[in-house]
Image: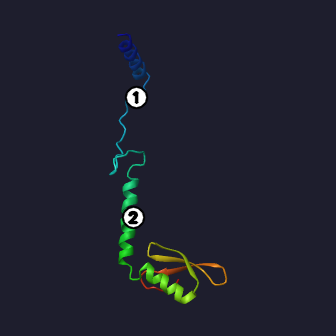
Amino acid sequence: MFRRILISILLTCLSLSGQTVLAAQPDYRHRDGHRDGHGDRHAVDAAASNRAALRLAQSKVSLDQAVAKVLRTFGGKLIKAETRGNVHYVKVLMDNGRVRTVRVDGNSGRIL
C-alpha cells in the first residue's frame, strides 16, 4: 500500500513539474530483430551493398580479368585485389621490392 502511495506522489510531482514521465520511443527494430538508436541506417547500408553488387555484376571486366591484365603488364606478385564502385584495385609486389596499387576501370578494362 505504501509503495502505491509513493509511486502516485512521485508521478504527481513529476507531472506538475512539466516532465514527461513515459515518453514514447520510436521502435528501431531491424530485420535481424535487434534494436538500436541508428534508425534506418542498417537498411540504407544493405541497399548500398545491393547497389554495389549490381554494379559489380554489370561491369564488363571481372576482378580476375583485371588482376591478370595487371600482372601481364607490370609483372610481380599479387598482394591484394578488391573492387570499389566500378574500379578494381590491384596491389602488386614488384620485382624491385616496391608495392604498387594499380586501378583498372571495371567497364573498359583500361588501366587508370
Q: Are marks 2 and 1 in contact (CB under 8 Å)?
A: no
Q: CA distance from mark 2 to mark 1?
A: 40 Å
For residue 91, side relative to residue 52 (left or right): right
Question: Please, is residue 86 above or below residue 108 in the view?
Answer: above
Q: Secondary structure at mark 1?
A: loop
Quarter of the image containing the N terminus?
top left
At which x and y percent is residue 55? Answer: 38, 73
At which x and y percent is residue 63? Answer: 44, 78
**Residue under the image location 41 percent in, 80 percent down:** 62
Question: Please, is residue 17 above or below residue 97 in the view?
Answer: above
Question: Please, is residue 106 above or below residue 24 in the view?
Answer: below
Residue topped by disc 2: 49
Please state which of the two labelled residues, at mark 2 or mark 1, is closer to the viewer.
Answer: 2
Please name whichever residue, 18 or 100, is drawn nearer the observer in this view of the structure. 100
- State the image quarter where residue 35 is shown: top left
Instruction: Point out the tag, 2 or 1, that comes first from the N-terminus.
Output: 1
Mark 2 closeness class: few <14, some 14–19, many ≥20 residues within 10 Å: few
Q: Which three-letter amino acid code belongs to the residue tagged 1?
A: Thr
At which x and y percent is residue 97? Answer: 66, 80
Mark 1 closeness class: few <14, some 14–19, many ≥20 residues within 10 Å: few
Which mark is drawn over residue 28? none
Which mark is drawn over residue 20? 1
* Residue closest to the far top: 1
- State the image quarter where residue 46 is shown: bottom left
**Residue under the image location 36 percent in, 62 percent down:** 47
